[in-house]
Amino acid sequence: MTEIFETLGLYFSYPFVRYALIAGVLIALCSSLLGVTLVLKRFSFIGDGLSHVAFGALAVASVLDTAEKTFFPWLFDKIGKMPLVILITVAAAILLLRTGQNTKIKGDAAVAMISVGALAFGYLLLHLFPTSSNVSGDVCSTLFGSTSILTLTKSDVILSAALAVLVVVIFVLFYRKIFSVTFDENFSRATGTPAEVYNLMIAVITAVIIVLAMNLVGSLLISALVIFPALSAMRVFKSFRAVTICSAALSVTAAAAGILISILASTPVGSTIVAVDALAFFFFWIAGLVRGRAA
């Protein structure tokens, strides 16, 4: 045990490890807050669809990043790739919401159409305009996560922190409205609440979180950060507030534990965090069964 703490102390002496832990915890916190709403509204599939869109957006940004070094060498040096990826993913979230309300194209069909198309387009684009000599490796690391979370710069952490704070502030300020829209959208409309506006806000925030989480767990594993903590909390608690608080605490703990375990065991960061979330769900499921029988 002493050796473990000494090893962790050695790793935490490096700034990139501290940056990874801070960014990971903030991303997990935001994912859990929106996760409860998305699960209850049965919008979980939107997170999965947007993660595929984010992969396609990242492919576009990577190709443009390579091109601009020749034609516009100042562009990405100033703004980076993340703002462009966020912009494309947010636009896709709005398109998914609008298309899903079309009676000719149902919501699940719209998600499948846009997400699969973006995934295929991104993979094709990276092969036509490779950004490195190992295209397959780059694609695999983007889909399933990589050590890129350990290469975050201070500016990346500041951007992640700013967006995380913005998400938390929005959630706290509009908590009652989000609660109302989550449980009874028709009643919210009847009382004068613009449900479409809040649905759009939830979709946009989800898109931002998806982009932030790509460096942590990869685009194919992002949904786990949204779904597992919320479902775990629902096994034990019943009220919206209790589920939200428990989900946030569990998600932050799982993210921190996953990052620390991956550092000590040299395992993939994203897969380790998801494995911890899945293990936590198993224990919460058992706890829910025990509590139900005791009651």
Image (cartoon, rainbow, N blue to C red):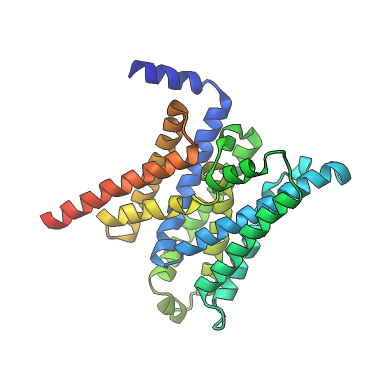
- Report the residue that reaches farthest toward the left: 294
For residue 183, say whether it is visible. yes
Q: Is residue 10 above or below residue 37?
A: above
Q: Nearer the viewer, residue 235 or 68?
A: 68
**Residue in view at x 40 percent, y 62 percent:** 39
Residue 269 in the image: above or below residue 179: above
Give the camera-side residue of 26 and 222. 222
Quadrant of image for the C terminus? bottom left
Residue 163, placed above or below residue 170: above
Numbered circles on residues, count: 0
- Which quarter of the rendered picture does the N terminus lie within? top left
Task: Please state if 57 lies on the left or on the right of 241 as rendered.
Answer: right
The quadrant holding residue 241 is: bottom left
Q: Residue at x 43, y 31 (%)?
A: 260
Q: Is residue 15 left or right of residue 130?
A: left
Q: Is residue 125 left or right of residue 49?
A: right
Q: Position of residue 213 (x, y in %)?
A: 54, 47
Residue 85 in the image, given as x and y percentages of width and height = 67, 53
Furthest residue in direction right, as rendered? 71
Residue at horizontal 70 percent and vertical 50 percent from the top: 126
Residue at x 46%, y 79% (from the top left corner): 189
Q: Find residue 209 and report its horizontal and vertical position in percent.
A: 54, 52
Closest to the observer, 215 or 249: 215
Observer able to see residue 74? no
Residue 256 x %, y %? 43, 36
